[in-house]
Amino acid sequence: MKDHADYIRPFLFAVRLLLWISAVITLGLTAWVVAHLKGYRAIFTLVIAVLTTVFYIPALFTACMHRNRGYMLPLDIIFYALWLSAFIFVAQTDDFLGGSGCSFFIWDLNTSCKRRNAIEAFSFLSFFWTFCGLCLEIANVYIGSWHTSAITHPEKPNGAISSGANGATATTPSAGSAPGMNGEPAQV
């Protein structure tokens, strides 16, 4: 029987990979803008893209782990908010410098707002994939805790262990188990 994580892991890995690719593209685009133009909004997006590129490399490996117990959940929550604010900063650049449109990102007249629109699109994709990863990680943790609570561990004894007055321990059989069951030899 397949574990629940066997179904979630491929989707989680794909979402993490798409997030990482979107962050790398955003990193390249905003690095060009920061190198050629000035503006704190582009620097903020660049910093978020750099941090995502660095911190989400281990996320690709944790998504493939058999027992992923939500290790990336705190990071997903933080980067969800950061990518949302980065997207909002880039989307508001139309009103930057007194309503000059997206001329803040223009480097010649033929390309107009293409670079700003590309940064806006890929920062939204990074936000979206972070949100999808957050939802999948929450589902993985929830289903994992629900699934493992019903499992009986085979290494634990069937009976309760009680200690007597002299310190000796005695094992009492659990309800429904009799000597000779479960492959144990019957004592005569």
Image: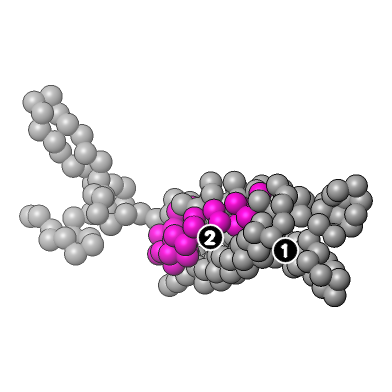
Residue 30 visible in the shown view: no
| Element type where label 1 sits in the image | helix
Residue 82 coordinates in the image, percent (x, y): 65, 48
Q: Inspect the magenta stretch and tell me whether residue 184 lies in it.
A: no
Q: Quadrant of the C terminus?
A: bottom left
Of the residues shown, which amino acid type is indicated by label 1? Ile
Of labels 1 and 2, earlier in sequence is: 2
Residue 72 coordinates in the image, percent (x, y): 50, 53
At x 13% / y 58%, what residue is drawn?
186
Q: Inspect the magenta stretch and tell me whether residue 69 lies in it.
A: yes
Q: Quadrant of the N terminus?
A: bottom left
Total marks placed: 2
Q: In the rendered image, which residue does mark 2 sit on?
A: 53
Q: Residues within 10 Å of mark 2 (few under 14, many from 20)?
A: some
Cα gap from disc 1 to disc 2, whole angstroms:
16 Å
Q: In the rendered image, which residue does mark 1 sit on?
A: 119
Which range of residues does the magenta coloring cover? 44-70
In the image, is 129 to the left or to the right of 172? right
